Image (cartoon, rainbow, N blue to C red):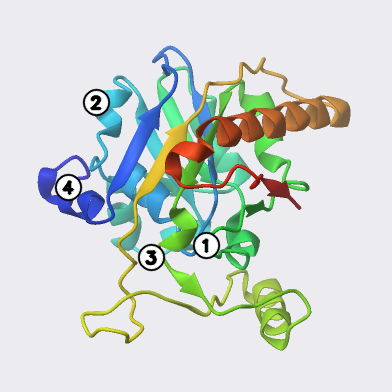
Amino acid sequence: MRNHPFWDPLANYFPMKLVKTAELSPDKNYLLAWHPHGIVSLSAVINVCTNGTRFAEQFPGINRYLATLDMHFKQPFRRELLSAFGLVGSSFKALLTVLSDVNKGKAVVLVVGGAEEALECHPNVFKLCLERRKGFIRLALESGAYLVPVYSFGETSTFKQVWNPVGSRLRAFQTRFKTVVGLSPVAAYGTNIIPFVPGIVPFRTEVVSVVGTPIPVERTPNPTREQVDELHRLYKSKLSELFEAHKSKYGVSEDSHLEFY
């Protein structure tokens, strides 16, 4: 279902593209840390849940999965449908089970920034919720899965969000809502068939997801805080290098850099 050409027009609408910078060997498992979250993580969904960008051809022998909230799997039929498109629960236990599988060639995509980062989604804003996000680092260490940084240029331009700076009433409400419910109530809008009228259709803008070079990780069942921090620093460095190496190709100014919070 997910590999059917039916999904090609969806990827071509933006267009959505996938750029490979290194091979992913089928004899390893991988944790692809995907950035930024954007409003609804369109690039992660289209690249992983469909084959519109030819993920399967670019990375042969790799079975891809997209992590999403466990609550989506509690309803019958919906659970089976999500599984058919390669979605898995995002709990630590569920992801550890997938990435620890002795049958290699598995790649789990995790949109690290989550609901909190969605509130920072604005065009030409490169702020990533990563400074305190270390669960995915521990997951890589405990499973031995290689870490792969991925950055999607253009993701934050697929929708526009009402300006919500920290300290504003809107942001205060969004933060409180997220704390209670676990989801971010983004005040976002897209385009419409009627000119100049906001809608729910994403803006037609090129989105390019660049898959970086895998970072080798040695399986460590009980990693120390120091080991987690060390790999976290290395990961941030490699992600920044990936962003800097490709930003000029995709319309990002030279004086723009990633900001971690």
The quadrant in which residue 245 appears is top right
Frontmost residue, 196 versus 158: 196
Residue of label 2: 57
Which amino acid lies under the numbered mark 3 shown in the image of this protein? Gln
Residue depicted at 78% across the width and 79% down the height: 167
Mark 4 vs 3, N-terminal side:
4
Q: Which mark is residue 75?
A: 3
Which amino acid lies under the numbered mark 4 shown in the image of this protein? Asp
How many numbered circles does the render carry? 4
Question: From the viewer's perspective, is the residue at label 1 or at label 3 nearer?
Answer: 1
Which amino acid lies under the numbered mark 2 shown in the image of this protein? Glu
Mark 3 vs 2, N-terminal side:
2
Mark 2 vs 4, N-terminal side:
4
Frontmost residue, 219 versus 35: 35
Quarter that holds the N terminus: top left
Which amino acid lies under the numbered mark 1 shown in the image of this protein? Pro
Q: Position of residue 69 (x, y in %)?
A: 52, 57
For the residues labelled 3 and 2, the Cα–Cα distance comes to: 33 Å
For the residues labelled 1 and 2, the Cα–Cα distance comes to: 31 Å
Residue of label 1: 123
Mark 4 vs 1, N-terminal side:
4
Task: Give the left or right position of residue 50, taking residue 133 as reference.
Answer: left
Residue of label 4: 8
Residue depicted at 30% across the width and 53% down the height: 80
